[in-house]
Image (cartoon, helix red, strand yellow):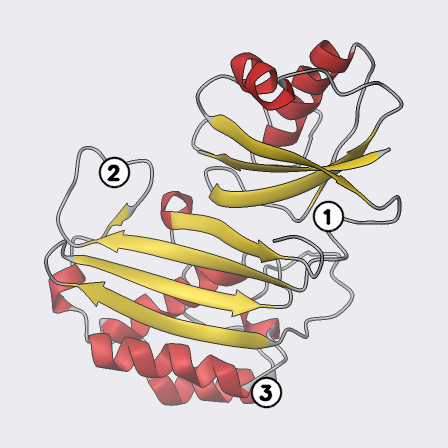
Amino acid sequence: MRYFLEFAYNGTRYNGYQEQPNGTTVQGVIEDALATLLRVPTKIVGCGRTDAGVHALQYFAHFDTEATIPKHFVYRLNSILGKDIVVYRVLLVADDAHARFDATSRSYQYVINFVRNPFEQETAFYCRYGKDLDLEKMQTAAQLLLEYTDFTTFCKSKTDTKTKLCTLRRSEWHYDASKQQLVYYVTANRFLRGMIRLIVGMCLNVGKGAVALEIVQQALDEQKTLAKALSAPAEGLFLMDICYDYID
């Protein structure tokens, strides 16, 4: 039987989602918990990768098992996982359902605080020059991306990605004056490795006047990386809103 797990995690203390030979990963911890509960080694397939320190407000992974799902499965799984990972539900799905390939869209948000907040050090990027940013230019830069489908400009080097094509459906900044917090929202059918953090870094450079909008547009037109590329810190980034045609 194939099941989907829906969960969320704080990625601060993990070396990314995907299992690796060295370092603690979200995938590894969940697989260990499933093996303990189901009493058989159980591999999971995730809806995507997140780098070290990146979080997920929503994440889906699937697993196959011949074991009987025990009573109070979600509660018992959460009692094993600890505080950084929370499973919300387990769903029986079709045998060919796939957490990665069946996702029709994924969204991310990136949170920037203009005031240092001791309670959000792990979940927001404190930008000391935030009040000097030109938010209008940053919004223009974000909206510019909707005109393109090739995002070579915002892909990490030495990646095994076969295509750099992505279809963005949303790319915009929202500023909350009461919180002095700036949040970037982006939705697409797929994302490249490091893409969101490079986009946020580009917008920050545009906002502080380090890179002109014309330079960004030229790089996108020529499918080249920016000379002044900036990757925003991991702590402000959240994966969220993974959509499937067959999951409410």
Which of pointers 3 and 2 lies earlier in the amino acid sequence? 2
Question: Is 10 or 140 nearer to us in this picture?
Answer: 10
Quarter of the figure with residue 84: top left
**Relative vertical location of residue 27 with respect to residue 186 in this rendering, above or below:** above
User: Residue shown at 33%/83% (left/top)?
Assistant: 140
Which of pointers 3 and 1 lies earlier in the amino acid sequence? 1
User: Residue shown at 42%/45% (left/top)?
Assistant: 234
Say which amino acid is labelled 1.
Ala
Q: Which numbered disc, 2 or 1, marks the residue closer to the eye?
A: 1
SS of the residue under disc 1: loop
- Between the residue at mark 2 and the residue at mark 1, the CA separation in whole angstroms equals 30 Å
- Is residue 14 visible in this depiction of the protein? no
Question: Mark 2 highlights which residue?
Answer: 120
**Relative vertical location of residue 239 with respect to residue 130 in this rendering, above or below:** above
Q: Are marks 2 and 1 in contact (CB under 8 Å)?
A: no
Q: Position of residue 167 (x, y in %)?
A: 61, 76
- Between the residue at mark 3 and the residue at mark 1, the CA separation in whole angstroms equals 34 Å
Q: Position of residue 206 (x, y in %)?
A: 30, 75
Q: Position of residue 149 (x, y in %)?
A: 62, 81
Q: Residues within 10 Å of mark 1 (few under 14, many from 20)?
A: many
Question: Is 199 or 62 nearer to us in this picture?
Answer: 62
Say which amino acid is labelled 3.
Glu
Which of pointers 2 and 1 lies earlier in the amino acid sequence? 1
Question: Mark 3 highlights which residue?
Answer: 222
Question: Is 143 or 223 nearer to us in this picture?
Answer: 143
Question: Mark 1 highlights which residue?
Answer: 99
Say which amino acid is labelled 2.
Glu
